[in-house]
Image: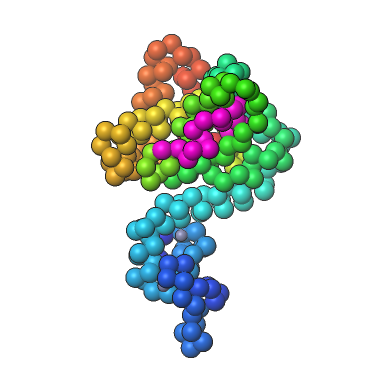
Amino acid sequence: MSSTSVTSSTRTACSSCHRQPSPDEGAFQICSGCKSQSYCSSQCQRKSWRSGHKQECKVIALSTKAQAIAATHTGDSVEAVKLRCEKEGGGFRKISLEPNHIVFDGPLLQVPAIMGIPLVIHRVGTKSNNRADLDCRIATFLNVKYEDGFAPPQWQSHVGTCIVARKDKKPLSAEHVEAVWMYIDKLMDTFGEEGPQAAQKEISREHYEEWFERYRDSEAENGRDEWRNVGSIYNV
Ligand SMILES: [Zn+2]
Ligand SMILES: [Zn+2]
């Protein structure tokens, strides 16, 4: 994979063993995928890659790319999706956001990002005395971790209504949020039944695209006309 190669960089410590370069050694090499990690040796780089940088690298690189695209956004508003919590009736709502909305400053959702989809999420801060009112199952699913298929505790309950958008400020449709959610739902079955390794294999653009086409066609066949002409999220 090209991301494993390294290019020259400034003098920073090794991201893996944290060693500083000695004066006669010159600068360590940086990861060419994300340009955010330095390594003293190919051993350290391989170790880091295997212990999770392979995924992290994709997320960092996609985030950098999304920010560059967002910087070229010239529109008045950005098409995004509201995920309503139980108290507000659940489901999706198309919304239009100001281009400087706080959601765009957030980190990418990990599993979608590993599949090449730059989604960000923001809680609007729904208040209720009844905890169950604040359940927002779709938001919980979108936040599951690559490592184990579980969402962090802060995304499991008391979530409230959320806004989901693309960090690159390209339009995001409710159909695409639904599809990502349904794909993660399928992944969670794999996490539960076959374990993390089997599920992680399916967290890729290739697998998602293949599944998406089948999902779109079957939804359209089931009478959901809005699905008929939904294109790939990678071609927006
Ligand atoms: Zn090292
Ligand atoms: Zn990297």
Residue appearing at x 36%, y 58% in the figure = 51
User: Residue 123's image quarter?
Assistant: top right
Q: Is residue 167 left or right of residue 6?
A: right
With 44 as the anchor, is 142 left or right in this view? Answer: right
The foreground one among 146 and 180 is 146
- 160 or 190: which is nearer to us? 160
Task: Tell me the quarter of the image containing the C terminus.
Answer: top right
Q: How is the image coloured?
A: rainbow
- In the displayed orientation, state which residue is furthest to the front: 129
Q: Quadrant of ligand 1?
A: bottom left
Counting from the top left corner in percent of width and height, residue 116 is at: 46, 44
Residue at image position (42%, 57%) is 53
| Residue 21 falls inside the magenta stretch | no
Q: Quadrant of residue 218?
A: top left
Q: How many marks?
A: 0
Asked whether 209 or 200 is in front, the reply is 200
Counting from the top left corner in percent of width and height, residue 35 is at 51, 63
Q: Can residue 112 be seen?
A: no
Q: Position of residue 109 (x, y in %)?
A: 51, 41
Magenta span of residues = 150-164
Q: Residue at x 39, y 55 (%)?
A: 52
Relative to residue 222, is residue 160 depicted above or below? below
Residue 155 colored in magenta in the image:
yes
71, above or below 88, in the image = below
